[in-house]
Amino acid sequence: MRGKTVGWLLVAAVALTATVAATAAPAFAVTPDLESDLPPALAPLTTAYETAPCDPNGPTANDGALATQLNSQLTSDMRGYMTAYRVSCARKVVEAVKARGLASRAGVIAIATVIVETHLQNISVEVDHDSLGLFQQRASWGTREQRLNPTWATNAFLDKMIRLYPNNSWASAPIGEVCQAVQVSAYPDKYQVQASDAQVIVNALWNPPAAYALAGDWFKTGEFTPAVVRRDGSVWEWHIKRTQSGGAADEVIRYGNTHMVPVVGDWNGDGYWTPGVVANENNSLRWYIKDSLTSGEADYSFLYGGKDNIPVVGDWDKNGTFTPGVVSKDNGAWKWELRNANSGGPVSHTFRYGNSNTWPVTGDWNGDRYWTAGVVDDTNGPRRWFLEDQVVSDGLANTQFDYGSHGTYPVPGNWNGNTAATEPGIVENYDNRVWRWHLKHTVSGELADEHFDYGDDAPYPYPY
């Protein structure tokens, strides 16, 4: 909204707080509002508007993964509301900033503006006078097509910012002040409030994930061992250990392009865990599966899941074969859709479990050979694990405990080969130089039973 007096009533956005019951996994429901006549900046975040794609190819699987991460890290309006689509919009803004060679602070200024103006949505209908797009630019800025193009709109925003703040003076001015100078809005105090979350979003997007932390029974020993999946050009390089220890990798393979999300499982039931990768394809998820611990092409692939879904893996029917599942945001909760075959087709099990600002995890938590859902929440400080023992959840956690601190990443696995259960593990970026793995031998919290250092990049959590 540009340079006009607002005659609207200010409506407070709904604040979502993850309230944890003593015996239940966190869950709440948010009903989307009908489309509002309020300017997007004043409407609740649940308001539905017509939107245009930000990325013409649609959100990526990594966008969905990053949305989950950000929902547990943000502290203001967007906490719990990030989706793959919203991340794709933020990504296009950050890419435009980087393409101009500007410092990341310019990205923070732009993202703070878009959070306020549209909550990271490329709004394609004229709600507030003739404003359109991520930045709600008026018709005087450009054509409809231009304003709905995130790259063009971001560059138009940056052009005006640089004119108003020559000689890089925008880099030292308060973020909220710069946003208001460009936007000339009727609510100048809103921008600075979002600067902290804008910084978190830009930090996550400025340098894409360099590596993932995963675990599996790679060598059919009955015990999980770590793997670090690193970016090597445009390909993922898998560094796999035979033991729960540091040191050099025992196996190194190259598999999957870096726009894909790594996943792992025993796909054919032979007892050996092998790689998979998941990619966005025409607004669906395509799974590329390997049945051996080797480099090269996939043994087979299939479509399962949608563009906003997060891939998960488990043995949902206790037959020894691991198959796909997807988790998607559904009115503030996670909707789980699990399939009992490594192929496309109908959902075998569906249920809602956990807040959508928690980490979805899967495991055989009670050792009965059925893999089931779990979520890990750090809303109130330490990471709290809520684990479900039933394949089709009733929404209540059977087990809950605290394990891990804020900033650590959950990596569950069968770390104790003497039991069939999946135990918790966490990975931290220790002293900004090495990954430290903290593993449990029981399905419980408190102190780690073992730890070791393996990996030296900022970790991304399993399985995304």
Image (spheres, rainbow, N blue to C red):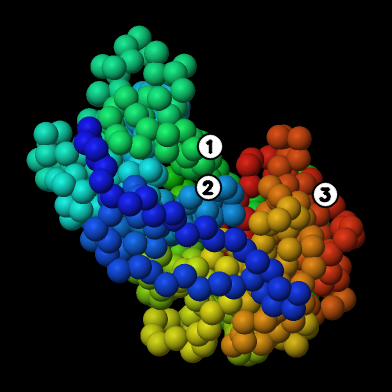
CA separation, marks 2 and 3?
A: 35 Å
Q: Is residue 416 visible?
A: no
* Local SS, label 1: helix
Q: Quadrant of the C terminus?
A: bottom right
Which residue does the numbered mark 1 point to in the structure image?
196
Q: In the rendering, which numbered label is found on residue 76? A: 2
Left or right for 220, reference 349? right
The answer to which quarter of the image holds residue 286 is bottom left
Could you say where residue 428 lies in the image, as x and y percent from the top left? 73, 47
Point out the tag, 3 or 1, that comes first from the N-terminus.
1
Which residue does the numbered mark 3 point to in the structure image?
452
Q: State if disc 1 and disc 3 touch (CB < 8 Å).
A: no
* Local SS, label 2: loop
Would you place residue 226 above or below residue 326 in this image? above
The kind of residue tagged 2 is Ser
Circle 1: is it few (<14), some (14-19), or many (20+) Cα within 10 Å?
some
The kind of residue tagged 1 is Ser
Q: In this rendering, which labeled residue sits more in front, label 2 or label 3?
A: 2
